[in-house]
Image (cartoon, grey):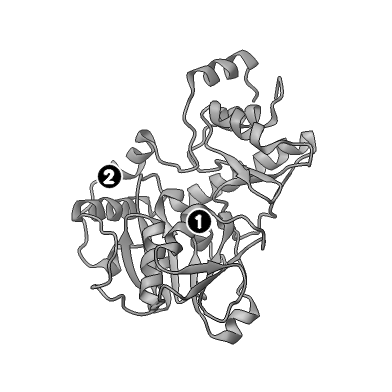
């Protein structure tokens, strides 16, 4: 279904908020409107897909907090280096990642003499394979699964090979905060780390408990949204940046733009319309929300402003 341009422009003038995170006040109610007793044992708090292979868990304020704690737990010093590896091998690295690393040590895109840790970033939920040079060197491996919760649920190859795996809950669950650090070994409780208050941990736990039966539907909806966006942008000669594998659940939709597309003007247009989106810097792409709570109207609204067409 398409909507009149006048309606799209009116909504733009009113500046709706369509975030990459699925959180808003109405979606939060979808997982918190059930009664549930909070379980004290952390091994019973979290979904099974984080507990396999004997991993230990920490619930933290954010994925960034989880990355910082993983680095501290790995024993790196200020002079050590983290080698960053991404799914595409491109130059784009979120500043949230680099700033978190810089609080503890250094980072590089290649193997250095002082490299002690490898960070595998499963970009936007699409798995990043472990390079042989990292395996041969025997480095500590941290998997950044911030956008890959859905992919992990569907059995995708994320969160399985590392010594640590980090998750950002806000990228998948309709909650405004939270991260998970999964570790193959116990995490020293004396390490400095960002902490969540007990009631905040209980909030996250209740989210896990009440969303257990919803996750398959959420993953299906994200994939449906991805296919819808992919099909629509093909009408103007654009294509999805990644192939959507059978076990991949996308964290965002990434479009591969032609050289004629100006990413900065597209970003300005979409952000001014209330759509959280940005360039895939240096990679010739652009990304925007794909989460499970997008309405059909919001999908068309995103496309209207991204494609900059008078009518869909």
Q: Identify which residue, 73 or 99, lies in the foreground.
A: 99
Q: Using the image, tell me which numbered label, if any, was put on residue 58.
A: none
Q: Are marks 2 and 1 in contact (CB under 8 Å)?
A: no
Residue 242 x, y percent position in the rendering: 68, 53
Q: Earlier in the sequence, mark 2 or mark 1?
A: 2
Q: Of helix, strand and loop, which one carries label 2?
A: loop
Q: Of helix, strand and loop, which one carries label 1?
A: helix
**Residue located at (52% from left, 81% from top):** 139
Task: Please state if 282 lies on the left or on the right of 124 as rendered.
Answer: right
Residue 63 x, y percent position in the rendering: 41, 57
User: Quick one: quadrant of the C terminus?
Assistant: top right
Task: Classify mark 1: residues with Cα within 10 Å, few (<14), some (14-19) or many (20+).
Answer: many
Question: Which residue matches tag 1?
Answer: 150
Task: Classify mark 2: residues with Cα within 10 Å, few (<14), some (14-19) or many (20+).
Answer: few
Q: Is residue 15 above or below residue 83?
A: above
Q: Is residue 71 above or below residue 45?
A: below
Question: Which residue matches tag 2?
Answer: 34
């Amino acid at each position: 279904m398409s909507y009149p341009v006048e309606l799209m422009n009116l909504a733009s003038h009113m500046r709706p908020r369509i975030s990459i995170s699925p959180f808003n006040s109405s979606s939060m109610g979808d997982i918190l409107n059930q009664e549930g007793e909070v379980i004290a044992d952390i091994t019973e708090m979290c979904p099974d897909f984080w507990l396999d292979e004997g991993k230990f868990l920490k619930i933290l304020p954010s994925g960034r907090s989880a990355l910082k704690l993983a680095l501290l737990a790995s024993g790196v010093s200020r002079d050590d280096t983290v080698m960053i590896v991404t799914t595409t091998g491109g130059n784009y690295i979120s500043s949230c990642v680099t700033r978190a690393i810089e609080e503890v040590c250094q980072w590089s895109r290649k193997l250095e003499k002082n490299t002690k840790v490898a960070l595998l970033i499963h970009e936007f939920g699409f798995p990043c394979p472990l390079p042989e040079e990292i395996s041969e060197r025997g480095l500590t491996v941290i998997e950044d699964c911030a956008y890959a919760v859905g992919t992990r649920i569907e059995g995708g190859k994320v969160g399985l090979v590392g010594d640590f795996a980090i998750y950002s809950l806000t990228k998948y669950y309709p909650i405004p905060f939270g991260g998970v650090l999964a570790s193959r070994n116990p995490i020293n409780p004396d390490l400095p780390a960002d902490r969540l208050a007990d009631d905040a941990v209980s909030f996250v736990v209740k989210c896990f408990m009440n969303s257990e039966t919803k996750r398959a539907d959420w993953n299906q909806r994200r994939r449906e949204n991805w296919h819808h966006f992919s099909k629509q942008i093909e009408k103007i000669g654009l294509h999805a940046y990644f192939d959507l594998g059978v076990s991949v659940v996308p964290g965002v939709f990434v479009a591969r733009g032609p050289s004629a597309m100006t990413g900065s003007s597209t970003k300005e247009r979409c952000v001014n319309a209330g759509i959280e989106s940005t360039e895939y810097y240096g990679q010739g792409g652009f990304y925007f929300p794909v989460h499970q709570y997008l309405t059909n109207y919001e999908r068309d609204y995103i496309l209207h402003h991204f494609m900059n067409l008078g009518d869909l």
